[in-house]
Image (tube, rainbow, N blue to C red):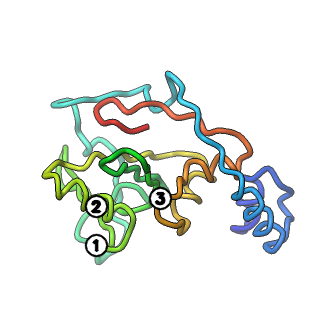
Amino acid sequence: LSTFKRMAIAMDLDPDTSAKELQEEYLRRKKQPIKPMLVNDGPCKENIQIGDEVDLLKFPVPMLHGGDGGRFMGTFHLTIAKDLDGDWVNWGMYRHMLHNKNTMGIQAGPHTHVMRIREGWKAEKKPMEIAIALGVEPVSTFCAATSMPHAVSEVEIAGAIRGEPLELVKCETVDLE
């Protein structure tokens, strides 16, 4: 399927919707953000590892490009971060290089939203809380990878595009959903 057909299907539209019609529908839906709904459980809660149990090396983390310095987790995923005052949660799509069994780095340019958020945490000398969601549905990853203005909620835009609230669960060890 072409990229446009996949997006049309993800938006519950006819697969043969033209690129122009798809763009118009996206812009129309985007005007009506829908807040997410917090639920108690979800598939991401099936396997929980905390503390010494964490072993990122158990995941199938590929070497994506010959020139990469290591293996990168997340190719079509969400990177979730919240500004320190908790008013804005950003969804982005950034590369995460696996360093060892329980640490990885983030590759993000200095002017990205996640790095702006990081500055607040850094100023307070606190480690920034972050979550990575792998295997989410395509509208969410589309919103994470789309350039949105500062402080716009990608999760609410994803809800608008889907026409219903996204169901989120609380993370186990950080104050994120």
Q: Which mark is residue 151?
A: 3
Callout 1: SS: loop
Number of marks present in the image shown: 3
Q: Amino acid at mark 1?
A: Asp
- Between marks 3 and 1, how big is the CA–CA gap? 31 Å
Question: Of the residues under marks 2 and 1, which one precedes in the sequence?
Answer: 1
When the figure is inspected, residue 27 is found, relative to residue 129, above or below; the finding is: below
Identify the residue shown where x is 57% and y is 58%.
Answer: 143
The residue that label 1 is drawn on is 68
Q: Which residue is mark 2?
A: 106
Say few, some or many: other residues with alpha carbon within 10 Å of mark 2 (under 14 / 14 to 19 / 20 or more): some
- Image quadrant where residue 163 sits: top right
The reply, left or right, for residue 34 in relation to residue 49 is right
Mark nearer the N terminus (2 vs 3): 2
Q: Nearer the viewer, residue 46 or 112?
A: 112
Quadrant where the C terminus sits is top left
Q: Secondary structure at mark 3?
A: loop
Residue 173: x and y in percent read 28, 32
Q: Earlier in the sequence, mark 3 or mark 1?
A: 1
Q: Amino acid at mark 3?
A: Ala
Q: CA distance from mark 2 to mark 3?
A: 20 Å
Amino acid type shown at disc 2: Ile
- Viewer-nearest of discs 2 and 1: 2
67 sits left or right of 13 in the view: left
